[in-house]
Amino acid sequence: MKTQIKFSQMNAIKPNRLFLLTLCMGLVSAALAGQPDGAALQFWSGKYPSDKDSSQRSLFKREPLQSAIQTLLPKAEIKTLRQLTVESKVQERGGYLVAHVCRPHNCPADAAMVVTQPATGLVWVGLFTREEQRVSTRWYTPNQEGASLPIDLVDEFNHRH
């Protein structure tokens, strides 16, 4: 005996398949979302912030850094950060990725430190400027409970100038 499936029965099957496919994709995405913490530390540690990852994005163009920088910094500071093109290799420091950048031919007077904690997605940006009549150190930090940067990282930035 041959089984025939009516058109209305086929349409009933498709939403179930779509639901299962969506569920599977969600589970895979969730599993992958949990991996980048360690993977990010391994990939970026020892590389320059301008190096590209497999998706051809530099460190500051990756999420959550790109969004955090846009949210944390005023437009003028974002412009300043983009002008700081001399860079040191990214360091992994106790679960944090630390990137130092500075202005070409003027590193002692114009520099920044960008710190991210891949496990939480939190980002901190420190900027230092020395001009004729003014010296300024500014920190932009996440507005979140318990989002304090380890003091040794703050001290490291302060002692570079």
Image (spheres, rainbow, N blue to C red):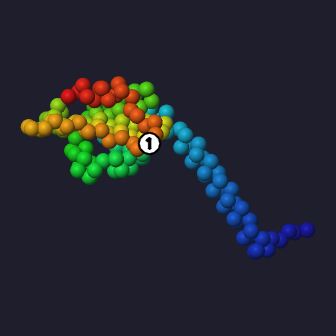
Q: Residue furthest bottom?
A: 7
User: Dot 1 corresponds to which residue?
Assistant: 144
Q: Is residue 108 above or below residue 24?
A: above
Q: How far across and how far down the image is residue 103, in percent?
A: 18, 38
Q: Nearer the viewer, residue 136 or 42?
A: 136
Residue 61 visible to an observer of this rendering: no
Q: State the image quarter where residue 58 is shown.
A: top left
Q: Is residue 146 left or right of residue 98?
A: right
Count of labels shown? 1
Q: Is residue 73 left or right of residue 53?
A: left
Q: Residue at x 58, y 46 (%)?
A: 30
Q: Is residue 68 left or right of residue 136?
A: right
Q: Residue at x 38, y 47 (%)?
A: 68
Q: State the image quarter where residue 91 is shown.
A: top left
Q: How far across and how far down the image is residue 69, in percent?
A: 34, 46
Q: Residue at x 74, y 68 (%)?
A: 12
Secondary structure under tag 1 reads loop
Q: Residue at x 44, y 42 (%)?
A: 144
Q: How far across and how far down the image is residue 53, in percent?
A: 40, 41
Q: Residue furthest right?
A: 1
Quarter of the figure with the C terminus: top left
Q: State the image quarter where residue 125 is shown.
A: top left
Q: Is residue 10 left or right of residue 113?
A: right
Q: Is residue 20 above or below residue 138?
A: below
What's the residue type where badge 1 is placed? Gln
Q: Nearer the viewer, residue 61 or 123?
A: 123
Q: How far across and how far down the image is residue 89, in percent?
A: 31, 31
Packing grade of label 1 (10 A; few <14, some 14-19, many >=20) is: few
